[in-house]
Image: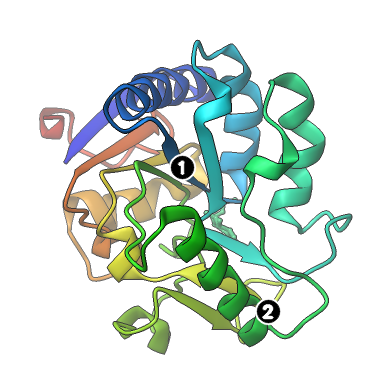
Amino acid sequence: MTIIKVADENEVISKLASYTEKISNDAISKRGKFFIGLSGGSVVKFLCEGLPTLNTDWSKWVLAFCDERVVPEDSEDSTFGTYKRNLIPKTSLKEEQFITIKQGVSAEEAASDYTKKLTAAFGSPNFIFDLLLLGMGPDGHTCSLFPGHPLLNETSLKVAPITDSPKPPPERVTLTYPVINSARNCIFAITGAGKADMVKRILKDQEDLPSTRVKPEGSLYWIVDSAAAAHLLTNYWG
Ligand SMILES: O=C1O[C@H](COP(=O)(O)O)[C@@H](O)[C@H](O)[C@H]1O
């Protein structure tokens, strides 16, 4: 695990963009495509500001979601809707490059449909993402994997429905740990004093919380601003 401490949100955005550029270009030169999983919440803003600066072959990107809320695309809770409005117009990405979660159906049907779409995109039932861009809530959740929820122990489904998310909206679809931990790279991007306690509990105390369980076969990075890193010892940085 590599922890990257930076001063503030602007530096989180630029660091996240530079790692994404390098990982995308490596993936494209080695395998011809770049499979990326996007998160919702605060990460959306970081990516909508940072990604348009990238020097990359956008036509080779395949964009999916670490989790998504089962809400109409024009809802402010729709993660895809927000990227569609705020990222696509600033890049040469096309809407067809996004593997989206079906709306207007149950979370169970949306998860099954998303699994089929990912299987077609990867050409295999093993979804090996080049990069998952992850957020962490103040309760330690990541994707739609919440503390104490039975989905933390899901091992057979690659994509799961959730209908009782403690953070609204309740109906969602999420990648599970077998997929998250098969990724080639995972990057958490965390800002703000409101997350400082949880950052310490996860990175220093290694408490068993959803974000602590992200231990990919590939590389794991945490990009943290100084407010979120406030309770970590300075000699902890590796
Ligand atoms: O509900 C969600 O929350 C997490 C964390 O959001 P943040 O605003 O605290 O960064 C996010 O990563 C996830 O994708 C989203 O659905």
Q: 214 or 191: which is nearer to us? A: 214
Q: Earlier in the sequence, mark 1 or mark 2?
A: 1
Q: Position of residue 28 (x, y in %)?
A: 37, 26
Which quadrant does the C terminus fall into? top left
Q: Amino acid at mark 2?
A: Glu
Q: Which residue is mark 1?
A: 36
Q: Which residue is mark 2?
A: 171
Residue 4 appears in view: yes
Q: 22 or 117: which is nearer to us? A: 117
Instruction: Describe residue 7's horizontal placement relative to residue 162 as left or right.
Output: left
User: Ligand 1 is located in which of the four quadrants?
Assistant: bottom right
Q: Residue at x 52, y 25 (%)?
A: 9
Q: Where, by quadrant of the figure, is residue 142 drawn? A: bottom left
The answer for how far apart the CA atoms under marks 1 and 2 are is: 23 Å
Q: Amino acid at mark 1?
A: Ile
User: For numbered disc 2, what is the local secondary structure?
Assistant: loop
Instruction: Describe residue 211's horizontal placement relative to residue 163 as left or right.
Output: left
